[in-house]
Image: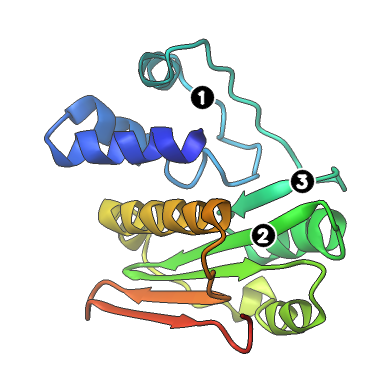
């Protein structure tokens, strides 16, 4: 449901709805970051989200501490440390997790991993992508405010969820470079 709501916000903001655009910009990086600090939902955000959802909404910032995850798990955290924690404590080897979708962004480049956490090849390939925060490329703060990058990621995540729900092929990795308008996928030997 969250993906559908975010996609509706995106569509409305592109049509000029300033409330939707403000909500997306305010929530980007905090709504799904997994980092509790600064992720409390404001009254304005809650009101806007409730208007779209048609029901009461409560923001629940959580810290991953080995919760049992099931289904499709979507991650959009800001640090490699957070990614490693989620992977090691709640995803790796969990048969209840159909796919782990890990979205990463740096300025106008996005990378999304769709990992089957019980497939040895997926595990091996994904774990090669985990590195220390000190080794991560740092972008200026203004690069994180490029709203259309987040919109593109949300769209790709929505497409991956649809593919999983309909039994279509799902690539292991998607690379999107919005500056050059390049989209690459890598399925490896997954059928």
Quarter in which the C terminus is drawn: bottom right
The label on residue 70 is 3
Q: Please tell me which residue is depicted at 59% across the width and 54% down the height of the picture.
A: 77
**Image coords of residue 179 (percent x, y):** 23, 75
Residue lying at 27% horizontally and 30% vertically, measured from the top left: 20
Instruction: Identify the mark at residue 100; answer none if there is no mark.
Output: 2
Which residue lies under the disc numbered 1?
A: 41
Query: In terms of secondary structure, where does tag 1 sit?
Result: loop
Q: In the displayed image of the protein, which residue is found farthest to the left?
A: 16
Up-down: is 47 above or below 172? above
Residue 156, how many percent across, how many down? 41, 59
Q: Hey, which quadrant is residue 68 in on the image?
A: top right
Q: Position of residue 52 (x, y in %)?
A: 36, 20
Identify the residue at horizontal 51%, vertical 33% (top origin). Answer: 1
Name the image quarter holding residue 49: top left
Q: Is residue 167 left or right of residue 180?
A: right
Query: Marks 2 and 1, how far apart in space?
Result: 25 Å
**CA gap, disc 2 and disc 3:** 10 Å
Picture residue at 31% right of the left edge, 69% below the top: 108
Q: Is residue 63 above or below residue 164?
A: above
| Label 3 close to label 1 by CB (< 8 Å) | no
The local crowd at label 3, few if under 14, some if 14 to 19, many if 20 or more residues have their Cα within 10 Å, is: some
In the image, residue 18 lies at what x, y percent?
18, 29
Q: Is residue 183 visible?
A: yes
Image: 110 above or below 29: below
Query: Looking at the image, is mark 3 or mark 1 earlier in the sequence?
Result: 1
Q: Nearer the viewer, residue 60 or 69?
A: 69
């Amino acid at each position: 449901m969250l993906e559908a709501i975010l996609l509706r916000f995106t569509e409305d903001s592109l049509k000029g709805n300033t409330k939707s655009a403000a909500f997306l910009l305010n929530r980007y990086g905090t709504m799904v970051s997994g980092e509790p600090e600064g992720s409390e939902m404001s009254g304005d955000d809650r009101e806007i989200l409730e208007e779209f959802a048609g029901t009461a909404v409560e923001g629940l910032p959580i810290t991953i501490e080995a919760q049992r995850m099931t289904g499709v798990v979507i991650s959009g955290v800001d640090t490699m440390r957070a990614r490693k924690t989620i992977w090691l404590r709640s995803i790796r080897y969990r048969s209840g997790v159909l796919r782990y979708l890990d979205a990463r962004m740096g300025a106008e480049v996005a990378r999304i991993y769709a990992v089957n956490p019980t497939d040895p090849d997926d595990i091996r390939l994904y774990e090669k992508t985990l590195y220390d925060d000190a080794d991560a490329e740092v972008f200026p703060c203004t690069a994180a405010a490029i709203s259309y990058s987040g919109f593109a990621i949300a769209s790709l995540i929505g497409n991956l969820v649809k593919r999983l729900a309909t039994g279509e092929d799902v690539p292991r990795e998607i690379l999107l470079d919005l500056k050059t308008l390049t989209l690459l996928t890598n399925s490896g030997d997954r059928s």
